[in-house]
């Protein structure tokens, strides 16, 4: 028998539910945070099987509407949950995620489970090995519920261009989730898993996190292994956690961070204790606000929410001042050629298996001159060196995550197919991929009554601990992270 005090755990879940006005039944296990779920398993107040069944029940109910999962590994997840439950009953725990159900963006390889990239090209592709991040999550005791929908091959910011159909935003199902990690954001926001992984090349973790009202962290370039992840751009790709709270993101980052000698982008540098860092005092920190570019043509309601968030941050830090960041070159000069290089063997043989918008993007990329690409790569290396100077005057940077609200799905599809510039949606996130800096998006308000707004906090290279600490402090000073969509 599961012997712990489940009543206390459900009470915690009920409190969260009441604050967020989501969960239809008080104390629903799907309403717990990742950390609450992990602690409940360790304290034996809830079992891995119960957590897994709670998530699978919501997937069965809501995925037909949201279209967030491409593959659900229900039977395998329950079998693993039973094995982990048996271990926990004997006092054996694999790691901090023991018995916690999670899901992965479907460009992350999983042994024996298909990894499609949301494309007809890879619709039946099954890897024989786990990506390094998947391996680490499993080693820490996580239960894989399935693979999540994305913008085809992570090559866009809407998650409507996908062989498996568009992902719908749980806050407003006629709108996009943003992308490319739209499935990851939607599942976390709607309670279809306790945490997910996404990838971020120009904002693909942070933008959908902002649009779906969750926490999404892009670590420092090289902090988390990319081995076993279908690449978009080797120079700019990052993998990171997408969770309901900052504390949850810290737990997941702790598991996946660290040097991987099999990945050429991985850097061998110490990994701090992120959970301990969450409680760091922020009162002496100096915050910089780069208004140029990041506040240009800002939606009025987003602007209002961000200024209110900055007012809260003034009370958490010693100083808030304006700063200027180096200008950043266009991302397509790097992303296009690197994407084309990976896809050339497939695209040259079966271009018709790509979605029309992706096909157009690849056709355009092949015409980018080699000299343009080389100069852009040199500029990235220069910028990653010089941007560190900004942090001589401030500890962290504060910006809006996005400048615009999510498009309605039909509008998003039209813009993608007609190649209308998506820059307004990703202009505030893309520079930090070039800089390679750690940055998180956390909820900071709502626009039009029901659309989440994201606040972006960025730190110096390897500064995830400070980023998490300030994000957590802001979270605790506000109630935005407690709200959940009323999707039914």
Image: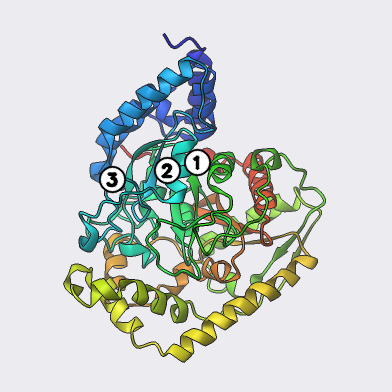
Q: What residue is shown with label 1? A: 244
Q: In this rendering, is residue 109 above or below 3?
A: below
Q: In this view, does 256 lie to the left or right of 395?
A: left
Q: What residue is shown with label 3? A: 113
Quadrant of the image occupied by residue 143: top left
Viewer-closest of 201 and 229:
229
- Residue 6 image position (x, y, % from top left): 48, 15
Q: What residue is shown with label 2? A: 189
Question: How many angstroms separate mark 1 from mark 2 (CA)?
Answer: 7 Å
Viewer-closest of 7 and 76:
76
Viewer-closest of 307 and 266:
266
Viewer-closest of 347 and 21:
347
- Residue 276 image position (x, y, % from top left): 69, 38
User: Which callout, 3 or 2, points to the residue nearer the camera?
Assistant: 3
Q: Earlier in the sequence, mark 1 or mark 2?
A: 2
Q: In which quarter of the image is the N terminus?
A: top left
Residue extending furthest front?
A: 261
Residue at the spot 41% in from the left edge and 90% down from the top edge: 369
Question: How many angstroms separate mark 3 from mark 1 (CA)?
Answer: 26 Å
Element at label 3: loop
Q: Quadrant of the C terminus?
A: top left
Q: Does residue 447 show up?
A: no
Q: Earlier in the sequence, mark 3 or mark 2?
A: 3
- Residue 256 image position (x, y, % from top left): 53, 46
Element at label 2: helix
- Residue 275 image position (x, y, % from top left): 65, 38
Q: Is residue 287 left or right of residue 346?
A: right
Labelled pair 1, 2 in contact (Cβ < 8 Å):
yes
Question: How many angstroms separate mark 3 from mark 2 (CA)?
Answer: 24 Å
What is the crowding at mark 1: few (fewer than 14 residues within 10 Å), some, or many (at least 20)? Answer: many
Element at label 1: loop
């Amino acid at each position: 028998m599961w012997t712990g005090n489940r009543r206390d755990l459900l009470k915690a879940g009920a409190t969260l539910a009441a604050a967020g006005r989501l969960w239809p039944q008080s104390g629903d296990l799907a309403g717990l945070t990742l950390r609450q779920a992990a602690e409940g398993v360790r304290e034996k107040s809830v079992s891995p099987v119960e957590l897994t069944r709670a998530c699978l029940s919501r997937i069965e109910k809501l995925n037909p509407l949201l279209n967030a999962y491409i593959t659900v590994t229900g039977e395998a997840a329950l079998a693993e949950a039973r094995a982990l439950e048996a271990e926990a009953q004997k006092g054996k725990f694999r790691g901090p995620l023991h018995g916690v159900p999670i899901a992965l963006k479907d460009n992350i390889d999983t042994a024996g489970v298909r990894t499609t990239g949301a494309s007809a090209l890879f619709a039946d592709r099954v890897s024989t090995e786990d990506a390094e991040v998947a391996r680490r999550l499993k080693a820490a005791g996580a239960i894989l519920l399935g693979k999540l929908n994305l913008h085809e091959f992570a090559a866009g910011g809407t998650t409507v261009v996908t062989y498996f159909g568009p992902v719908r935003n749980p806050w407003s199902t006629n709108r996009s989730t943003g992308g490319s990690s739209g499935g990851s954001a939607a599942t976390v926001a709607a309670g279809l898993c306790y945490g997910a992984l996404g990838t971020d090349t120009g904002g693909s973790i942070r933008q959908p996190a902002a649009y779906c009202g969750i926490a999404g962290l892009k670590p420092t370039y090289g902090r988390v292994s990319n081995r076993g992840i279908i690449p978009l751009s080797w120079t700019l790709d990052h993998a990171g956690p997408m969770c309901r709270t900052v504390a949850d993101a810290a737990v997941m980052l702790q598991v996946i961070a660290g040097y991987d000698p099999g990945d050429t982008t991985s850097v061998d540098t110490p990994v701090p204790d992120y959970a301990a860092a969450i409680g760091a005092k922020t009162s002496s920190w100096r915050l910089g606000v780069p208004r140029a570019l990041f506040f240009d043509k800002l939606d009025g309601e987003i602007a209002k929410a961000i200024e209110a968030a900055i007012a809260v941050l003034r009370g958490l830090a010693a100083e808030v001042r304006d700063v200027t960041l180096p200008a950043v070159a266009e991302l397509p000069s790097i992303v296009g050629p690197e994407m084309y290089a990976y896809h050339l063997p497939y695209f040259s043989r079966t271009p018709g298996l790509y979605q029309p918008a992706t096909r157009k993007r690849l056709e355009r990329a092949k015409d980018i001159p080699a000299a343009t690409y080389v100069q852009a790569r040199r500029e990235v290396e220069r910028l990653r060196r010089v941007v560190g100077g900004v942090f001589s005057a401030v500890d962290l940077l504060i910006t809006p995550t996005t400048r615009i609200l999510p498009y309605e799905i039909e509008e998003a599809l039209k813009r993608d197919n007609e190649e209308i510039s998506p820059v307004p949606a990703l202009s505030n996130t893309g520079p930090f991929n070039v800089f390679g800096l750690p940055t998180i998006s956390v909820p900071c308000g709502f626009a039009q009554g029901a659309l989440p707004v994201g606040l972006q906090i960025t730190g110096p290279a390897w500064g995830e601990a400070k980023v998490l600490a300030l994000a957590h402090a802001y979270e605790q000073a506000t109630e935005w992270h407690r709200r959940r969509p009323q999707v039914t």
